[in-house]
Image (cartoon, rainbow, N blue to C red):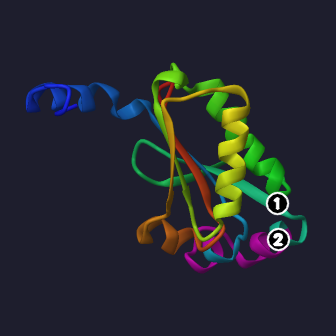
Amino acid sequence: MLRQGKSKQEIVDWIESNKLKVNHWFTIDSLEHLKRGGRISATSAAIGDLLVVKPVLIVSNDGSLNAVKRIRGRKKSIKTLFEEFKARAIKPEEQMIYIAHGDCLEDAEYLKSLILSEITPKDIIINILGPIIGTHTGPGLVGVFFLGKER
């Protein structure tokens, strides 16, 4: 926005008016790290992993991770991220979409291909996940970040 000539106050105002429109949707490959972090019980983790359940998580307004769906199978959980993106994104063709991954670039590329199969955003940037969320989720996280309907 600075490159577009916006003032610092205009940028602050834009951030303030759009902060609840920033959507963060994730899926993880294993429940082990959620169990270790005390977010789910050992029994829930064992049953979930046995049934190949992959939670779909969001970041809530208070910054916590919340499971909103439980999907059976990795590919289906990634497709769910794509479906939520399609349903919630505001003018996705005008956005830069961000995809983060926890040491699973192939899955991030798969999500990117799903998006590009139906939508042509300004750009899609794939990066490795940062350590803070990665500590809670472990390797195997795939997430998509975009402007969409308010959380």
Q: Compared to 22, does 68 lie above or below?
A: below
Q: Name the residue under label 2.
A: 49
The furthest residue to the top: 91
User: What residue do we see at 71% from left, 43% from top?
Assistant: 113
Task: Please provide percent x and percent y for residue 44.
Answer: 77, 69
Q: Compared to 64, does 1 lie above or below?
A: above
User: What residue do we see at 60% from left, 71% from top?
Assistant: 103
Q: From the viewer's perspective, is 10 left or right of 34?
A: left
Q: Are marks 2 and 1 in contact (CB under 8 Å)?
A: yes
Residue type of the residue flagged with mark 1: Val
Q: Name the residue under label 1.
A: 53
Where residue 106 sits, quadrant-wise, is: bottom right
Q: Is residue 78 magenta?
A: no
Disc 2, SS: helix
Task: Please provide percent x and percent y for residue 86.
Answer: 66, 27
Position of the N terminus, as image quadrant, is top left
Q: Main secondary structure of the magenta part?
A: helix
Where residue 116 sits, quadrant-wise, is: top right
Task: Please provide percent x and percent y for residue 101.
Answer: 57, 61
Q: Give the range drawn in magenta.
A: 34-47
